[in-house]
Image: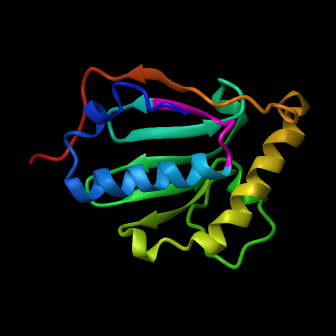
Amino acid sequence: MPQHQDVQDFLSPFSPHIQELTHSLRDFIKSLVPEANELIWDNYNALAFAYSKSEQLKDAFCHLAVYSKHVNFGFNRGAELTSTNLELKGNGKLIRHIQVTALADFPKALIQPLLFEALGISEVNNPLLQDKQSVGKSIVMSVSEKKRRPKQ
């Protein structure tokens, strides 16, 4: 999937470390599910990327939320995941995440099966997604006028 032209501008207020971490996590997701669309929100509190085989957030299986000191790697229906040896944070109805501060600490081997299980949950909830094999697109969904971003 080609990166949307605005992604680097959206990431520019963040430190080089957080920018690199974000790109690495995005590449990890896209390498495992290249047919997923990347839905982007440049919101007030965070820059958010959701990954969905449709162009709708309701079908997203995972997401990244970029903050000044870390990136949350989340599962949109994380409360429904069954195959986890990883403690996911969150106590809401559905969303669970881990906080990533360094790529060296990112548990790829534990996250990969969770990502595929999350994708399966998404496909069960919307069977039209099951056979999608095209290359995903990077789509900006919204840009907030006001933003709380780190000062460099």
The residue under the point 60% across, 68% down is: 88
Q: Is residue 72 left or right of residue 93?
A: left
Residue 87 vs 139, above or below: the answer is below
- Residue found at the far left of this picture: 152
Q: Position of residue 149 (x, y in %)?
A: 21, 41
Residue 9 vs 145, above or below: the answer is below
Q: Quadrant of the N terminus?
A: top right
Q: Position of residue 131 (x, y in %)?
A: 87, 33
Residue 96 vs 47, above or below: the answer is below
As for residue 38 lying within the magenta part, the answer is: yes
Q: Position of residue 97 (x, y in %)?
A: 56, 60
- Residue found at the far bottom of this picture: 85
Q: Is residue 150 left or right of residue 137?
A: left
Corner quadrant of residue 108:
bottom right
The residue under the point 52% across, 57% down is: 73
The residue under the point 86% across, 38% down is: 125
Q: Which residues are magenta?
A: 33-40
Residue 130 vs 92, above or below: the answer is above
The residue under the point 50% across, 50% down is: 27
Colour convention: rainbow
As for residue 28 lying within the magenta part, the answer is: no
- The residue closer to the viewer here, 57 or 135, is 135
- The residue closer to the viewer here, 26 or 122, is 26
Q: Position of residue 43 (x, y in %)?
A: 37, 32
